Image: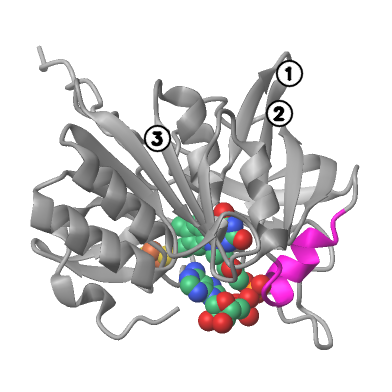
Amino acid sequence: MSEPAPAATEPRTLAPPERRVAVVSGVERIGAYHVITAHDVSGPTNPRPGQFYMLSTDECWGGAGDERPYLPRAFSYARARVEPDGVAVSFLLEAVGPGTERLAALRPDEGLALVGPLGIGFRAPPDGLRPILVGGGIGAAPLLCLQEELEQTTLLLGFRSAAHAQAAALFSGEPQVVTDDGSVGRQALVTELLAAELNAGPGGTVLACGPPAMLEAIRALCAERDVPAQLALESGMACGFGACFGCVVPTTDGYVRLCLDGPVVDAHRLETALFAGAGH
Ligand SMILES: Cc1cc2nc3c(=O)[nH]c(=O)nc-3n(C[C@H](O)[C@H](O)[C@H](O)COP(=O)(O)OP(=O)(O)OC[C@H]3O[C@@H](n4cnc5c(N)ncnc54)[C@H](O)[C@@H]3O)c2cc1C
Ligand code: FES
């Protein structure tokens, strides 16, 4: 008789092996961002915070004239609400190019094509360690569902401007917010808030998502203080499920595909050169 399979320890919910179409139920403008919610009847109802979906619109997604989108784009899910006949999945996105602009133009009842959830999400913080969630810009997206799942978190958010900082209102409690231009909170980098938090006392663990320069600063701050950190990284993703090798990043165990072995990675596994030269 064969041995029973070991219990899964990774925060990874497996995706059905196919593209499916969810029906858009809402598109909301939150300052500089958009929240797209779609009703997914056949996908898993339990994605893990930090996992992502490959998204495209069901119609008008490239293939003719100058419709550039073509490949789906990667997005962390921000929230998932179980409903009687499926799950309402929400994404927070910033329109920065043709794919995100097309997604932001979706309207209720249109189709959102998705594959997911994909990758490995955030692991539960070790017992006794206070979770410190750190988000930079659109990196706030996966922290929304993460905050819902964890208790007694400290939440630190940094945004470019007041329009971007409106996303802070999506969180519960009272996040500490700073902006690049000082229009909301202090004019500071979110890593300054983190340094103050870590200097105030031991017993924390950091879970972060944001631009490369922010993640590199967090990696360095946590390494200096021996604080465990999990970082949700980004990389160009063409497929999202391990086939194209377009998303590899160097780690102390060699190159890994971020769509399979990430996007959440333990900071101590990262080569310090990973973010060298990253500027935001
Ligand atoms: C795992 C993962 C999760 C993500 N989650 C979110 C999310 O929740 N919300 C959100 O708005 N965006 C998220 N992104 C980024 C999103 O995938 C890109 O913004 C999108 O692909 C841009 O497509 P576009 O056609 O609009 O712009 P493009 O024309 O493709 O790019 C516009 C600009 O963004 C840069 N860019 C494009 N893709 C990436 C990327 N993956 N990483 C870094 N820079 C990039 C380009 O260099 C260019 O400067 C995520 C990316 C990954 C890999
Ligand atoms: S995105 Fe294709 S292998 Fe990771």
- Separation of marks 1 and 2 at Cα, in angstroms: 6 Å
Residue stretch rendered in magenta on the structure: 95-106
For this rendering, which residue is in front, 114 or 81?
81
Image x and y of residue 71, in percent: 61, 70
Mark 3 — residue?
154
What residue did someone put label 1 on?
85
Q: Is residue 125 above or below residue 69?
A: above
Mark nearer the N terminus (3 vs 2): 2
Q: Secondary structure at mark 3?
A: strand
Can you see residue 74? no
Residue type at tag 2: Val
**Which comes before the other along the chain, label 3 or label 1?**
1
Q: Mark 1 and 2 residues: CB-CB less than 8 Å, in contact?
A: yes
Foreground mark, 3 or 1, reads: 3
Residue that badge 2 annotates: 41
Kind of residue indicated by mark 1: Asp
Is 114 within the magenta?
no
Instruction: Report the side of 109 relative to 38 (left or right).
Output: right
Q: Secondary structure at mark 1?
A: loop
Q: Marks 3 and 2, how far apart in space?
A: 34 Å
